Image: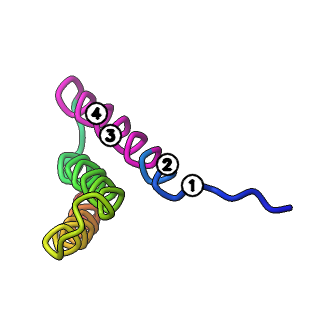
């Protein structure tokens, strides 16, 4: 029998992991010398965490603005990832 996974719980776990990665990257950005695109890359993780958080809350907030904001944050975070890696 396959195990059913609760999608909002998985989304929350992904959000917490992204927040942890973003926090670690921001800590490294402030305490160490990094390359020029590292800040954009860290900001992309922060926005991607917000994207996943809004995706998890779609059932609670249930408005088209939440869906549009989540998708916009996802697209902007991918653009920041690209800029950060290109800066490397």
Between 73 and 33, the residue placed more toward the observer is: 73
Characterize the local packing of mark 1: few (<14), some (14-19) or many (20 or more) Cα atoms within 10 angstroms: few
Q: Are marks 3 and 2 in contact (CB under 8 Å)?
A: no
Q: Mark 1 highlights which residue?
A: 6
Q: Earlier in the sequence, mark 4 or mark 1?
A: 1
Q: Earlier in the sequence, mark 4 or mark 2?
A: 2
For residue 23, which numbered disc appears in the image?
Answer: 4
Q: Quadrant of the C terminus?
A: bottom left
6 sits left or right of 39 in the view: right
Q: Quadrant of residue 78?
A: bottom left
CA gap between label 4 and label 3 equals 6 Å
Between 20 and 41, the residue placed more toward the observer is: 20
Q: Are marks 4 and 2 in contact (CB under 8 Å)?
A: no
Q: Nearer the viewer, mark 4 or mark 2?
A: 2
Q: Nearer the viewer, mark 3 or mark 2?
A: 2
Question: Which residue is pictured at 20% across the width and 65% down the height?
Answer: 73
Q: Are marks 1 and 2 in contact (CB under 8 Å)?
A: yes
Compared with 28, 12 (above or below) is: below
Q: Mark 3 highlights which residue?
A: 19
**Residue 41, image x, y percentages:** 26, 52
**Residue 10, image x, y percentages:** 51, 51
**Residue 6, image x, y percentages:** 57, 55
CA gap between label 3 and label 2 equals 15 Å
Q: Nearer the viewer, mark 3 or mark 1?
A: 1
Question: Which residue is pictured at 86% across the width and 61% down the height?
Answer: 1
Q: Are marks 4 and 3 in contact (CB under 8 Å)?
A: yes
Characterize the local packing of mark 2: few (<14), some (14-19) or many (20 or more) Cα atoms within 10 angstroms: few
Q: Mark 2 highlights which residue?
A: 9
CA gap between label 1 and label 2 equals 5 Å
């Amino acid at each position: 029998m396959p195990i059913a996974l609760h999608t909002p719980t998985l989304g929350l776990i992904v959000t917490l992991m992204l927040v942890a990665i973003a926090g670690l990257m921001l800590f490294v950005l402030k305490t160490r010398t990094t390359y020029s695109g590292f800040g954009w890359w860290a900001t992309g993780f922060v926005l991607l965490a917000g994207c996943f958080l809004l995706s998890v809350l779609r059932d609670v907030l249930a408005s088209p603005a939440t869906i549009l904001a989540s998708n916009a944050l996802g697209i902007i975070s991918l653009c920041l990832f690209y800029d950060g890696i290109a800066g490397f």
